């Protein structure tokens, strides 16, 4: 009954099922692993001491920025150089901008330093002047921003002196010196009017919407695997039932129906020819001897009248 599984058509169906189910399970497991990683990093970040309780370390010892070093206090010594304003940044539900200064260290590299936040729009709000001379700053370490960072401006077209996001890839095109692939935000601005910008958690460490999307994708892949298996069983069952009905004679074969129809048409044609021949012969015989008194006209012979 199941010999149809060895036909070329079913070989293709079986091969698709054998490949599709492991692929769906593999993708679902991968998405589940990503969700578990986000949960672990979130728990690890919560167990870490608060940034303010840790001792500050030189910037070079904390690079590159990862989930463990993000938010750690970092120190650097140098002189403030170029200044940029970062528009479109909110703090306490108020719109404003960051004041970003490049701190040129003794090694020649510059460290982007966010000295603070100001309400309003760049160019219309007075910005406190940066300290002059050699300074040592201590701020919370942050990774370079990207297009997915909240508040980042990637459309371009900003006026001179403004930058859309704090990134080494962006700043290196605006200044004639190398830039650290990181930045710090000062918690002690030292100047009236500037408000400190709180350090943000490292990307990929929080249980945000994206993390639960991974969990949703996990369920979808496992559902796909179950659906493929369900459809395969359904097709096999339907094919097996059709083969069984054919063996029991519940489904007439195509050749038998055709032969019966041909025979019926042949019998009908023969009967028609016989009737036509009989009628013609009787009429011919009746009209052949009209002088015979024992024979009446054609209509009387057909009706049987004497």
Image (spheres, helix red, strand yellow):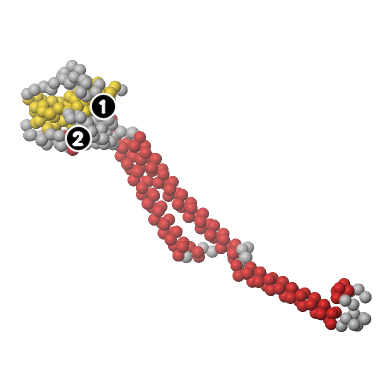
- Expressed as whole percent of the image width and height from the top left, the position of residue 28 reads 37, 46
Viewer-side residue, 56 vs 181 = 181
The answer to whether residue 109 is visible is yes
Callout 1 environment at 10 Å: few (<14), some (14 to 19), or many (20+)? many
Relative to residue 88, is residue 105 drawn left or right? left
Tell me where residue 269 sits by quadrant: bottom right
Q: Nearer the viewer, residue 304 or 49?
A: 304
Residue 154: give x, y in percent of width and height. 25, 35
Q: Secondary structure at mark 2?
A: loop
Q: Position of residue 58 (x, y in %)?
A: 12, 31
Q: Say which residue label 1 marks.
A: 89
Which label sits on residue 235?
none
Q: Residue at x 28, y 31 (%)?
A: 150
Rendered location of residue 132, percent (x, y): 8, 22
Which dot marks residue 167?
Answer: 2
Relative to 198, 59 lies left or right: left
Crowding at label 2, few (<14), some or many (≥20) Cα neighbours within 10 Å?
Answer: some
| Residue found at x 9% / y 31% | 105
Is 253 placed left or right of 189 in the picture? right
Q: Residue furthest front?
A: 291
Residue under the image location 91 percent in, 73 percent down: 305
Quadrant housing residue 293: bottom right
Image quadrant where one finds the N terminus? bottom right
- In the image, is residue 248 above or below residue 44? below
119, 140: nearer the viewer? 119
């Amino acid at each position: 009954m199941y010999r149809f599984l060895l036909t070329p058509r079913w070989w293709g169906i079986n091969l698709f099922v054998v490949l599709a189910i492991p692929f769906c399970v593999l993708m679902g497991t991968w998405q589940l692993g990503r969700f578990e990683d986000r949960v672990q990093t979130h728990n690890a970040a919560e167990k870490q001491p608060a940034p303010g309780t840790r001792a500050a370390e030189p910037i070079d010892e904390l690079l590159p920025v990862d989930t463990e070093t993000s938010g750690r206090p970092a120190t650097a010594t140098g002189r403030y150089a170029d200044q940029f304003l970062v528009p479109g940044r909110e703090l306490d539900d108020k719109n404003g901008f960051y004041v970003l200064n490049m701190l040129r260290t003794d090694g020649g590299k510059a460290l982007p330093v966010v000295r603070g936040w100001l309400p309003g729009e760049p160019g219309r709000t007075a910005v406190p002047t940066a300290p002059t001379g050699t300074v040592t700053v201590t701020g919370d370490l942050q990774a370079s921003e990207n297009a997915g960072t909240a508040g980042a401006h990637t459309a371009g077209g900003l006026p001179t002196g403004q930058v859309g996001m704090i990134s080494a890839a962006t700043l290196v095109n605006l200044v004639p010196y190398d830039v650290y692939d990181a930045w710090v935000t000062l918690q002690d601005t030292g100047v009236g009017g500037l408000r400190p910008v709180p350090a943000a958690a490292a990307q990929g460490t929080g249980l945000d919407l994206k993390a639960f999307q991974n969990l949703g994708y996990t369920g979808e892949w496992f559902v796909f695997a179950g659906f493929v298996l369900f459809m395969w069983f359904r097709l096999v069952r339907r094919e097996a039932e059709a083969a069984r009905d054919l063996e029991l004679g519940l489904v007439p074969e195509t050749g038998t129906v055709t032969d019966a129809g041909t025979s019926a048409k042949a019998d009908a044609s023969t009967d028609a020819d016989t009737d036509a021949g009989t009628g013609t012969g009787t009429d011919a015989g009746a009209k052949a001897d009209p002088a015979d008194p024992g024979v009446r006209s054609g209509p009387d012979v057909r009706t049987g009248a004497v």
